[in-house]
Amino acid sequence: MPSAETIAIISILIAVLSAFYARWSAKEAHKANDIGRLNALLAFRQHYLELMAHQEKLAQMLQASPGGLEACRNKYASLDLKLREISQEIDSYHAKVVKNKI
């Protein structure tokens, strides 16, 4: 039967290995969250670009209506502002993902 010291040493070794694994696991989860956030932001970017293209087509159809054309311009400006915010966030998360060399 192993002595108390042997059991203590094995327990310490297991605890140290568990701590290293927990740290590694937390880092990997953080990387996965950053990648997921970047993918979501890219999907938002694509969505806003599609909405802006739709507003351009709508503006071409409503050229005879000053009120409709103005509404399209306002909506386009709002979408452009949101797209710029998304682009700034993408730049931020892109730097994090590249820094982690994923």
Image (tube, rainbow, N blue to C red):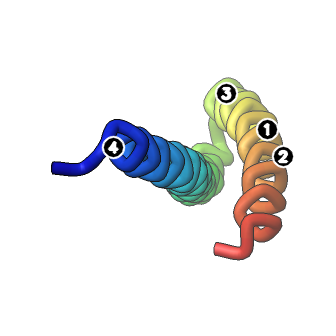
Residue in front for this viewpoint, 69 or 75? 75
Q: Residues within 10 Å of mark 3 (few under 14, many from 20)?
A: some
**Residue visible at 81% across and 66% down in the picture:** 99
Q: Does residue 43 lie above or below 83 as drawn?
A: below
- List the residue tagged with mark 2: 88
Left or right placement of residue 92 versus residue 10 in this view: right
Residue in front for this viewpoint, 28 or 15? 15
Amino acid on which the number 3 mark rests in the picture: Ala
- List the residue tagged with mark 3: 71
**Residue visible at 57% across and 47% down in the picture:** 23
Q: Residues within 10 Å of mark 2 (few under 14, many from 20)?
A: few
Q: Are marks 1 and 2 in contact (CB under 8 Å)?
A: yes
Q: Are marks 3 and 1 in contact (CB under 8 Å)?
A: no
Could you say where residue 18 lies in the image, as x and y percent from the top left? Answer: 44, 47
- List the residue tagged with mark 1: 85
Residue in front for this viewpoint, 4 or 26? 4
Amino acid on which the number 1 mark rests in the picture: Glu
The local secondary structure at tag 1 comes to helix
Amino acid on which the number 4 mark rests in the picture: Ile
Instruction: Report how far apart the C-alphas of labels 3 and 1 lie in the structure.
Output: 22 Å
Quarter that holds the C terminus: bottom right
Instruction: Report how far apart the C-alphas of labels 2 and 3 lie in the structure.
Output: 26 Å
The local secondary structure at tag 2 comes to helix
Q: Are marks 2 and 3 in contact (CB under 8 Å)?
A: no
- List the residue tagged with mark 4: 7
